[in-house]
Image (spheres, rainbow, N blue to C red):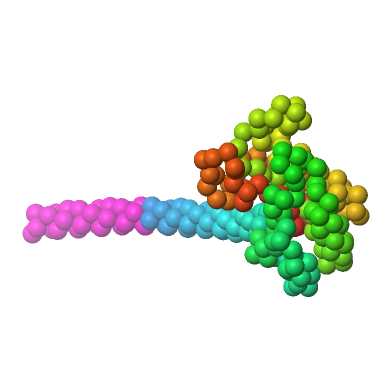
Amino acid sequence: MRLGLVVAIILAIISSAVALGLKLQNSGQEKHIRELESQLQTTTGNLQQRNDVLKAELANKITLIETMRKQLPGTTQLPAELISMLEDWAGGSDLVTFESNRSAVKFKSSLFAGGSAEVEPAGAEMLKSLCKILNTEQAKVFDIIIAGHTDNQPILNHVTLAKHPSNLYLSVHRAISVFNVMTNNGIIPERVSVRGFGEYRPIVPNEPNMVGTPQNRRVEIYIVPRGI
């Protein structure tokens, strides 16, 4: 009897010890699980905050891109009344075209004599009437970019070369001449900038002959948002 009692007591002690050990083990595991859950919640919160920041940055960049795209020359949306005035102005002339989808006025090569940067009288008159439109209330909120272009025919005349060392110079000088006509006819200089591209932005392939390519000899005037 005593031996059986001793064995029973020992078994009870062992069972209690095992139960206590399992309880402690489970308690430790539960604590570790809670710690992992807390870390997961913290990480998830941090990731959500970072995601919100990235979304905001992306939205700002998309807005900036769209704003910059709208400000590019040739992408400005002009008021309907201004478009109508420019279309009427250009409609009866063989010297100029107005492209409403580009907000651009394009003067053909006959604006200048060959190799010259002096605006021809007919062109000067067209520019004067254009200035009246560009000084209306509908147009005053816009700036103006004048861009000169040439074909790829080399300048051979030594007198012309002395004034315009290359087609790039000639394109800039022609744009400056247009600038002078416009600022002499009421356009404030602060609204206007000048660019020259020489032969490097043809609108049609240049012909391989000494006659040149008249379509590429042109001056384009872009109507753009203020400050471009």
* Spot occupied by residue 41 in the image (x, y as percentages of width and height): 47, 58
Span shown in magenta? 1-30
What residue is rendered at 63% in x and 56% in y?
Answer: 69
Residue depicted at 41% across the width and 53% down the height: 36
Closer to the camera, 115 or 70?
Answer: 115
Which residue is at a point 55% across and 50% down the rendered structure image?
Answer: 204
Q: Position of residue 133 (x, y in %)?
A: 84, 64
Q: Which residue is painted at 72% across and 54% down in the image?
A: 107
Q: Left or right: 60 with respect to 95?
A: left
Q: Nearer the viewer, residue 186 or 123?
A: 123
Q: Position of residue 15 (x, y in %)?
A: 20, 57
Q: The N terminus is located in which quarter?
A: bottom left
Residue 226 seen in this snapshot? no
The number of discs equals 0
Q: Quadrant of residue 166?
A: top right
- Please tell me which residue lies in front, 128 or 68: 128
Residue 187 falls left or right of residue 24: right
Q: Main secondary structure of the magenta part?
A: helix
- Describe residue 197's horizontal placement relative to residue 43 as left or right: right
Q: Judge whether residue 23 is colored magenta.
A: yes
